[in-house]
């Protein structure tokens, strides 16, 4: 909804002034928590459709933000990256529930398998920012 220079941003859905405020007012120049200590593991942002996730991936690649990974979890598809403070960020979309993997007795059986990013990018609407396809996927 609004950005204050490089120091803060206010995010919202549905036109509200802000649901989330992010800033570096007291942390700018600070170091991330050491491995094995308490801190933010990651932020997950859910997209309503696979096409919307593909469009977000195109914007990430166009901005030359390095990817940390990508996975098919059976129930969802996820792309992983880090924010400027080295916090993990997960961009994902849920699969339709009828596609969720289940055992013969109906128990959910999530997994982690590689996600084909080239296939995902084919879902992005035409005119997306990336001209030549993904690099270093």
Image (cartoon, grey):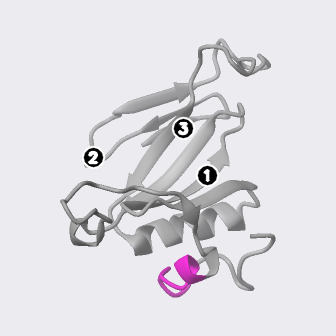
Q: Position of residue 115 (x, y in %)?
A: 58, 69
Q: Nearer the viewer, residue 17 or 64?
A: 64
Q: Position of residue 122 (x, y in %)?
A: 54, 85
Q: Classify 10 Å Cα crowding around label 1: few (below 14), some (14-19), many (20 and above).
A: some
Between circles 1 and 2, the one closer to the viewer is 1
Question: Tags 3 and 1 in contact by the CB under 8 Å rule?
Answer: no
User: SS for tag 1?
Assistant: strand
**Mark 3–mark 1 distance (CA, rounded to whole Å):** 24 Å
Marking on residue 80: 1
Q: Nearer the viewer, residue 110 or 22?
A: 110
User: Main SS of the magenta segment?
Assistant: loop
Between circles 3 and 1, the one closer to the viewer is 1
Q: Classify 10 Å Cα crowding around label 2: few (below 14), some (14-19), many (20 and above).
A: few
**What residue is at 53 percent from the left and 57 percent from the top?**
112
**What residue is at 64 percent from the left and 61 percent from the top?**
60
User: SS for tag 3?
Assistant: strand
**What residue is at 30 percent from the left and 65 percent from the top?**
100
Question: Tags 3 and 2 in contact by the CB under 8 Å rule?
Answer: no
Magenta segment, which residues? 119-127
**Mark 2 highlights which residue?**
15
| Residue 87 in the figure: left or right of residue 40 | right
Q: Quadrant of the C terminus?
A: bottom right
**What residue is at 64 percent from the left and 22 percent from the top?**
24
Residue furthest out toward the left: 105
**Mark 3 highlights which residue?**
3
Q: Position of residue 127 (x, y in %)?
A: 55, 85
């Amino acid at each position: 909804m609004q950005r204050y220079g490089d120091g803060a941003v206010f995010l919202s859905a549905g036109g509200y002034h802000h649901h989330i405020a992010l800033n570096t007012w007291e942390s700018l120049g600070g170091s991330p928590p050491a491995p094995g200590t308490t801190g933010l593991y990651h932020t997950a942002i859910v997209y309503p459709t696979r096409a919307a996730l593909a469009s977000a991936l195109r914007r990430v690649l166009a901005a030359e933000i390095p990817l940390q990974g990508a996975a098919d979890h059976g129930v969802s598809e996820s792309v992983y990256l880090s924010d400027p403070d080295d916090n993990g960020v997960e961009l994902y979309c849920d699969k339709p529930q009828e596609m969720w993997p289940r055992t013969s007795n109906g128990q959910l059986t999530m997994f982690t398998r590689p996600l084909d990013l080239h296939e995902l990018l084919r879902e992005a609407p035409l005119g997306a920012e990336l001209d030549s396809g993904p690099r270093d996927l």
